């Protein structure tokens, strides 16, 4: 019996073939055209995509419903120099797989064959095509599941992180079995090219739940249509409710009122350019100026500005980009990658970051001088970060601190750093009670420390997916009040309450945080607990989805830049 706390699988950019099952028997000798006839014979000519014979290709036939056992390798036959092969088989239904290697290029194909008793050796043509793979992730539990392709000799055990790849598969459809290799507790599901499947085996007493996602359309370029901007800000939620971005203006008291701004379209990936001073006849001189049509030029404009991008590209910041208030940075419909020195706010407000990827910083050392990809500082308020990807940074990818408040991060991805989000400064530096942050439907993976590190303030984290983190999903410390509900934690330490511990392992009480955990799904150990959270409840309306395989699938597939 497969005993697991949870199991899911992601079968991404998939390819496939045909279905088969239980091994009945296959000749081990290398029969070619003209070999011994049996009662029934599968006779084939294997051809390259060009139509030329695929000489000396490998071919094998397995019964429909065949599932590999892991310790047996089914032998291949070989075509002759004209690409022909005959496979004597008992009557029944089979899947034939063909493989051919020419130098470093491998091609393959599959064919479903039904053999009747004493059938004639009719020769079918099979054309070879490109190969691809099924890739996925399995949430690891108390025992190790296996992944198999029905009808093909593919038997894969996920690695220690739950990752697996089944390669060298022709394009098509497959039946994929995930779970107990003895089929005591497993599921067989059909996967088509491009499918992503989550398989929930968390309850061994019930049937396995398989979730297939609904396809989501990629975001479209809004073409400076203010109706599209209005539709965007209606989606803002959490503490950022009230943000208007380029459709609003902030007064000296911090109030945001409606006022349609201007549209600024970024037309170049340049940041600064070097200009030669020709006014002096004595000596030539050059100076760096902001490139016309650049992201920096749009960002530095006064008043509300809707920043759009004319083209895909990497926008490398040669110096930190310090933002003014009332801006919408809208990368919908484009692949916008921001690298270099990072983006900063300083007492700014009313900012929207939509559909952007932050990557490849200029500073790569893991020390405190490394700037964040995006930093929300010094009483900045009403900031909404939505469908953004933070894919590479040496230390912390995003921070909110020094009394910054009313910030929401939604449907975003944090990967390849030490910590995804730093919320506040350590309590011995500043005790911050004003800061507030909502985080929902975000995905965290491949972090060498924590997903969210909270020092003080109010944190509301719901419907996030913490996968493969070395330490905690959430650290709630330094008197932070944290409502942590309906998240998915696939790491051994879901939530930590103390920032410091003594050498004997005892916590330092002055660094404690206060968390209220509700209805979270723990897939690798841990459980919900309540430390009062000092009665903290957010003052806005929201709807949290159930923490289950369907949520895991949606967050994994739909978070980040689109």
Image (tube, rainbow, N blue to C red):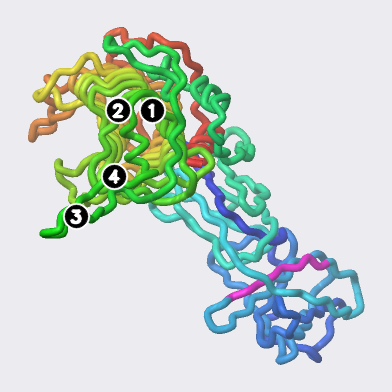
Give me the disc on residue 286: 3
At 58% from the left edge and 41% from the top edge, which residue is drawn?
218
Residue contact between numbered discs 2 and 1, judged by CB atoms under 8 Å = yes
Q: Is residue 227 above or below residue 177?
A: above
Residue 89 visible in image = yes
Residue where numbered disc 1 is placed: 327
Give me the disc on residue 324: 2
Under circle 3, the secondary element is strand
Give me the disc on residue 290: 4
The answer to which of marks 2 and 3 sits earlier in the sequence is 3
Foreground: 523 or 165? 165
Magenta region: 106-113
Foreground: 341 or 4? 341
Under circle 2, the secondary element is loop
Give me the disc on residue 501: none
Q: x, y percentage for residue 72? A: 57, 69
Residue contact between numbered discs 3 and 1, judged by CB atoms under 8 Å = no
């Amino acid at each position: 019996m497969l005993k697991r706390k949870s199991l899911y699988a992601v079968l991404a950019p998939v390819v496939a073939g045909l279905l088969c099952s239980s091994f009945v028997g296959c000749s081990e000798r290398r029969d070619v055209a003209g070999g011994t006839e049996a009662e029934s014979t599968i006779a084939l000519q294997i051809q390259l995509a060009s139509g030329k014979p695929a000489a000396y290709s490998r071919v094998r036939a397995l019964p429909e419903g065949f599932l590999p056992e892991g310790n047996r390798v089914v032998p291949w036959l070989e075509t002759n120099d004209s690409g022909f092969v005959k496979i004597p088989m008992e009557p029944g239904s089979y899947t034939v797989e063909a493989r051919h290697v020419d130098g470093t290029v491998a091609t393959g194909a599959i064919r479903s064959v039904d053999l009747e008793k004493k059938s004639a050796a009719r020769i079918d043509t099979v054309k070879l095509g490109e190969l691809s793979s099924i890739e996925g992730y399995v949430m690891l539990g108390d025992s190790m599941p296996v992944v198999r392709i029905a009808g093909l000799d593919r038997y894969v055990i996920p690695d220690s992180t739950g990752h697996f790849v089944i390669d060298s598969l022709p394009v098509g459809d497959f039946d994929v079995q995930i779970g107990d290799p003895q089929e005591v507790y497993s599921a067989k599901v059909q996967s088509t090219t491009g499918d992503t499947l989550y398989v929930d085996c968390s309850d061994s007493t019930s049937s396995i739940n398989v979730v297939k996602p609904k396809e989501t359309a990629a975001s479209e370029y809004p073409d400076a249509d203010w109706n599209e901007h209005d539709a965007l800000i209606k989606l803002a939620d959490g503490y950022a409710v009230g943000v208007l971005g380029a459709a609003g203006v902030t007064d000296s008291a911090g109030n945001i009122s409606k006022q349609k701004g201007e549209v600024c379209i970024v037309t170049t990936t340049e940041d600064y350019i070097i200009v030669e001073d020709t006014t002096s006849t004595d000596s030539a001189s050059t100076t760096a100026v902001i490139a016309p049509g650049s992201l920096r030029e749009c960002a530095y404009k006064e008043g509300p500005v809707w920043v759009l991008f004319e083209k895909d590209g990497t926008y490398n910041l040669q110096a930190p980009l310090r933002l003014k208030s009332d801006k919408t940075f809208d990368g919908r419909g484009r692949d916008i990658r921001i690298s270099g020195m990072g983006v900063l706010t300083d007492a700014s407000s009313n900012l929207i970051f939509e559909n952007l990827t932050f990557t490849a910083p200029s500073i790569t050392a893991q020390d405190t001088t490394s700037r964040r990809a995006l930093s929300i500082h010094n009483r900045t308020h009403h900031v909404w970060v939505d469908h953004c990807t933070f894919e590479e940074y040496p230390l912390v990818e995003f921070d909110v601190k020094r009394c910054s408040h009313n910030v929401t991060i939604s449907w975003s991805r944090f990967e390849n750093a030490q910590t995804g989000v730093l919320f506040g400064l350590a309590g011995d530096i500043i005790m911050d009670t004003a800061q507030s942050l909502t985080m929902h439907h975000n995905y965290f993976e491949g972090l060498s420390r924590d997903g969210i590190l909270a020092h003080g303030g109010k944190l509301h984290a719901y419907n996030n997916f913490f996968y493969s983190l070395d330490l905690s999903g959430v650290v709630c410390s330094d008197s932070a009040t944290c409502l942590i509900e309906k998240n998915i934690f696939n790491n051994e330490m879901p939530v930590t309450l103390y920032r410091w511990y003594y050498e004997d392992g005892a916590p330092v009480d002055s660094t404690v945080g206060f968390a209220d955990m509700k209805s979270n799904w723990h897939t690798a150990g841990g459980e919900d607990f309540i430390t009062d959270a000092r009665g903290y409840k957010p003052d806005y309306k929201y709807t949290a989805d159930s923490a289950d395989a369907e949520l895991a699938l949606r967050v994994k597939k739909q978070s980040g830049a689109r």
